[in-house]
Amino acid sequence: MSSVERFNPHVADARWQNIWEERNSFVADDNSSKPRAYVLEMFPYPSGRIHIGHVRNYTMGDVLARYKRMTGYEVLHPMGWDAFGMPAENAAMEKNVHPRGWTRDNIANMKAQLKRLGFAIDWKRELATCEPEYYGHEQALFLKLYAAGLVYRKESAVNWDPVDMTVLANEQVIDGKGWRSGAPVERRKLSQWFLKITDFADELLTGLGSLDQWPDKVRLMQENWIGKSQGLKCTFRFPGGDGGIDVYTTRPDTMFGASFVAIAADHPIAQKLAANAPDLQAFVEECRKGGTTAADIETAEKLGFNTGLTVEHPLDASWHLPVYVANFVLMDYGTGAVFGCPAHDQRDLDFARKYDLPVTRVVADGDVTDSVFAGNIAFTAPGNIVNSHWMNGMTIDQAKADVIARAQAEGWGKGQTQYRLRDWGVSRQRYWGTPIPIIHCQTCGAVPVPDDQLPVTLPEDVSFDIPGNPLDRHPSWSKVDCPSCGNAARRETDTLDTFVDSSWYFIRFASQPKDKPFDRAVAEKWLPVDQYIGGVEHAILHLLYARFWTRALSHIGLIDVKEPFASLFTQGMVTHQTYQDAKGSWLSPDQVRREGDVWTIIDSGAPAVAGRIEKMSKSKKNVVDPDDIVDQYGADAVRWFMLSDSPPERDLEWSEAGIEGCWRFVQRLWRLTSQVRGADGADKALDRKTHQVIAGVGADIEALAFNKAVAKIYDLANAIEKAAPSASRDAAIRTILLLSSPMVPHLAEEAWTQLGAEMGGGLIANAAWPAVDPTLLEEDEVTIAIQVRGKLRDTLTVAKGLPPAEMEALALASEKVQHAMDGGDIKKIVVVPDRLVNIVI
RNA sequence: GCGGAUGUGGCGGAAUGGUAGACGCUACAGACUUAAAAUCUGUUGUCCGUAAGGGCGUGCGGGUUCGAGUCCCGCCAUCCGCACCA
């Protein structure tokens, strides 16, 4: 065998990257007459270095983008930076750098890292959300939503650090304490800006029905998040007096099982009572301890305070229920008050047992109909109503309808549709975000910044030496004249949630004029995004906010797009083994060495413990830097690894052995290419294999089943290597290059030029995807399975399309089958054409 | 607490209800080499058996079916999200 020089990615990678750039190979043409494909991966936060998870994400998108180009599409595949956020402020505090400089440096580094991977990106459309050229347009869109009545202000709770005197993000609350001060956090109310996402709750819910190319699990999660429920809103009246407590319930069928009414600590009635009752005041304070997350609130021990008030049961005015203030009732959901039916709700049951309240069964658990409910597990399954007067025997649904009808007829309540979804609070008490373009005036109230004064830019001269929002304490930035009356006024110092930035960047990618957020006609040419790819951690918030924002823009007539992402794919994480020393300190993989089953620390020789395979994280030291592995193996081997083995929606474990195998395959493809010799003759079997693989790889890439596409390419490589020289073999080698070119583009270009002298040259990136010859896909023989009572006993190779009677005869003639039947009587024979025969005895 | 997922050899995984383990990795054996690397060939779920062959096998327990990794019911374990991380 002649020796072939190795493919050298250290030279080839950069050469091809430069050629693609010089030739504008991947610049998308707005005016193209080709069919369009918009391929988008979730843009990264510029943390400083790209993470291996980014490499996986962008490699998947890149393969699809390149494949789409080869199959005749005008492809838009852009990249940008989700550049506002807390890490820049943390860096500013810790390293005394300005967030802008830190972020821009990070972007430059990460862009260089991405370029080394050879992604087919239209860099001319690059954007960063922290630049006024982006966020200025965002401010304009915000004000359009404001003018349309989709933005309002209300009080809302934040995590408050009483020592640092600052607002904390949930992430900054660790075990209920501020991450820097260590002080127990409190919930404090601030006046904040909200977007009316709840106006779109029903649209966002029904819209999910049209997203048939989204994963079912994501649609289900969004459905649950929106949480539409039908229930009863009714009043429990104060005995004899005026008014009462409005309660919302999804279980009006259980009203005869009520044993208490509970209201939120923030409920107006609780507030009013607390004003004159120090012990209740103390309890309300107690309820404010702890963070604002759902997990914190719902896992906290259930606590209540008996107010001494009672209310009348709506179905029986002589029946009085005690009123508690309870920490598990949320002011944000429903009316901020519930009636407790302990037998059929776990939280209510926990509460009732704790405060020794009656527990009455009103839904039958099979034959058990006792009114006294025993045990500490609530019964929430379907059943029939019991112990409920006229409702006895009804199903839950019948009883719900009956109570609602009765409430409406008698005027003490009505049926109501309720959503779990809350309006989107977008105010952040931080510097590094989009300034909210509002001016507060003592006489005019909140006044939008006039269009001609946009963008409202962030001041540069800020300091981060003390906690809190530097915009608040800036000496002059917030001091402005009211645009309406001209009097001294104050600029809003809160900035927008970074989820706002990421709610429309895909529109700006499609069209980025200087003077407006986007050109409608151009944006509509590209949108919706044909394939969106990103982490499943964004399944709810980012994707729901982006859907809402797009609908809101559509609602006010700025764009005619309802759903921004036609097809969604959520990828798994990249994981890696973790290692610890005897004391439990984390070790990086290159600090340890394996000898048999024993791990030791290379430097000290001390034993190490190989731990769990976990998501790569700096704190556990199990990270791999993409630059290092590209240095070592070249971009193509890294890309190939990202696509191999693990299904893309599942986690991928990084391994040294795995990347070495990929490196070997890249070299193997290179050697194969050198074997095109202009031989004659056809190889029917290889032709068939080649065309089966062309069809299979194309289908797999379209389904984003890259691991399967990779396996088929391996299969073809094996078949080519085993085949004798022929024209078919030469053709198969060209084909395998084309098929693998979206995955290993540098090698493919290099090899393509080697073959190019014969073929007229040109980039493989611009080559056409090979066509499938359907006549070659069909096999003329098939192997069928012969089973006896469902167990495999023999296999036979027969002509394709053999009639069932003949299959049956062949099966019965088999010695192995006869042996397995052991003389038994045949009860039945199942024949599946071209597949199997099952003899039942 | 609520919501969502995952579970198949030594490992990653493949398998329209129809031959479980494709393909890759690892390991082992052999070829080539002064040697190593690279490359090539073969073996590699498990148990019994010299072999032919057979038993058992897709987290656990049931069920449906001629036939279940796949469908249904009930468990167990692990992971992810929960509205101010991005």
Image: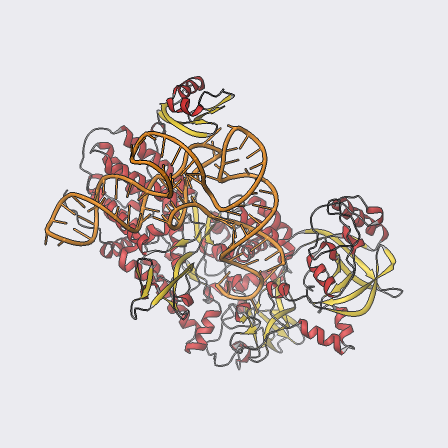
Q: Position of residue A138 (x, y in %)?
A: 52, 62
Residue A799 appears in the figure: no
A133 or A607, nearer to the observer = A607
Task: Answer with the quarter of the image where residue A656 lies.
Answer: bottom left
Residue A566 x/y as whole percent: 50, 47
| Residue A513 can be seen, yes or no | yes
Residue at left offset 34%, top offset 35%: A771
**Residue B17, above or below A60:** above
Residue A392: x, y in percent? Answer: 81, 46
Measured along the vertical axis of the image, is residue A601 above or below residue A257? Answer: below
For the point 51% across and 52% down, which residue is it?
Answer: A520
Of residues A279 and A430, the one nearer the viewer is A279
Instruction: Note whether A773 is above or below A382 in the view shown.
Output: above
Q: Is residue A415 left or right of residue A836?
A: right
Q: Quadrant of residue A274?
A: bottom right
Q: Quadrant of the N terminus of chain A?
A: top left
Pick whichever, A137 or A106, lies toward us.
Answer: A106
